[in-house]
Image (cartoon, grey):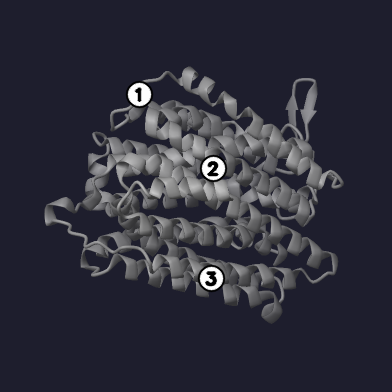
Amino acid sequence: MKDMTASIESITNEDPKNGSLRAAVRDGVSHAVMMGAGETYLGPFGIFLRATTIQVGLLATLPQLFGAIMQLASARAMPRFRSRRAVVLTGVLVQASVWIPMAFLPFLLGSGAIPVLLLIGLVTLYHGANGAVVPVWNSLIGDLVSSEIRGRFFGNRNRLTGMSTFIALLLAGITLHVFERENVAEAGYLIIFVAAFLARLNSARWLARYEDPELRILPEEAFTFRQFLRRSPHSNFAKFAFFVGAINLSVAFSAPYFALYMLRNLKFSYVEFTAVTAVATVTQFLAFRYWGELSDRFGNKKILNVCGWGVAIVPILWIVSPHIGYLVLIQIYGGFVWAGFNLASANFMFDAVTPPKRALCVAYQGLVNGICVFVGSVAGGYVATQLPESYPLGPWTWKPISSLPVIFLLSGLMRLVASGFLLHRFKEVRPVVPIRDHELIFRVSHLKPIAGATFNLFTGLFSEHKAHVPGKVKDDE
């Protein structure tokens, strides 16, 4: 912790706005605790309330679609905002307040259709408040972080927030496991959601310390979503946005159902679910700093070239074995490539868009992503209910435990298609040191010890938990 804090201090001291950047780091840490203790467990909470497969998909995507619409509304209204910081604070406080009624749902209404629908409504409000914040916060932080230190700053910030997410996620999982053994899992959810509420309040405290420079947007710098779409064949940023949207559509086709697969099909305990989930987080935490340094030197497009293909095979690997040790290995790999993909995607937007247009571009990209995520998840949920139980392959017949492994396979194939068709269509936008893709892969090969350390950590912690693989579960899938 001291080494990472010192690393952040060394970078923030390079910038005259270092007070705001230090606050941004601490805000990020608090936000990460909320994510780890709260948002990570919204899917399992829906499953605990007996959500159907379709409802699990809606819980994961309908709120995000509404959040994307709110991003657009917030960005278009931003020229009228007197204070970007005040708008961000308002949205954060609304988001924090939603955790309390969510925490009390099982105490007031038990489980079933009504509490699940109310949960979807509350999570929609939660993501709506977040959507209103995202373009404004991106506009503000983009003005506060200079381009010379952007990769290192966000790489180190993400590293610290990743560690915070991991610790919060781990403690929340242990809490749920303890209370589930006493048949009072609802009390465990109450505790972790209250923790998420308090963490977001602390996030607001640090956000209040951001500098709040005036934003000036000229009328000619504004453009509509229709104009964004019309310019997309010739816009480098639009081509990038549609690539990320296509990847997110493919991810959403399967993403909401991994928790369902582990908790309902594989019968994982909360500790086992937490182990498999947290290992990706801790791997990202270990890898972010290195991806940030590579981003500053070689550019974000080169990282996307490598990680775009890397994230495509992650869900395909899930169909090989349901053993928890194997899934931990897959999560180590997934956390590594997703760390590079997410960091490069975020930083590419800052490089490709001028500050006055940044909020609108973030909102338009968010809207594209929101639509893609919604379509992908609904399609995945529908397809999951239509697939056969077995697949004859010559003399051999594949009988997956449920339809979900097939959904994972299809998601991976969709990601491969998206990378193959769209990755080459946009370019790097700033001067960088040239490097070939295979040379970049060779450079990051020194991160292999991260995988070994992470695997040893989790196999040591959870070696007593063996994956139980039952037969075909006859449920909503």
Work out how far the residue at label 1 is from the one at label 3, CA to CA, in angstroms: 47 Å
Residue 457 versus residue 307 in the image, above or below: below
Instruction: Name which of mark 3 and mark 2 comes first in the sequence.
Output: 3
- Marking on residue 122: 3
Q: Residue at position x 72%, y 64% from top?
A: 48
Q: CA distance from mark 1 to mark 2?
A: 31 Å
Q: State the residue at coordinates (62%, 72%).
A: 194
Q: Nearer the viewer, residue 367 or 91?
A: 91
Secondary structure under badge 3? helix
Residue 52 x, y percent position in the rendering: 67, 59
250 vs 156, nearest the viewer: 156
Q: Position of residue 456 (x, y in %)?
A: 75, 37
Q: Which residue is mark 2?
A: 251
Q: Nearer the viewer, mark 1 or mark 2?
A: 1
Disc 3 marks which amino acid?
A: Leu
Q: Camera-side residue: 353 or 15?
A: 15
Q: Which comes sooner in the sequence, label 1 or label 2?
A: 2
Write down the residue under mark 1: 433
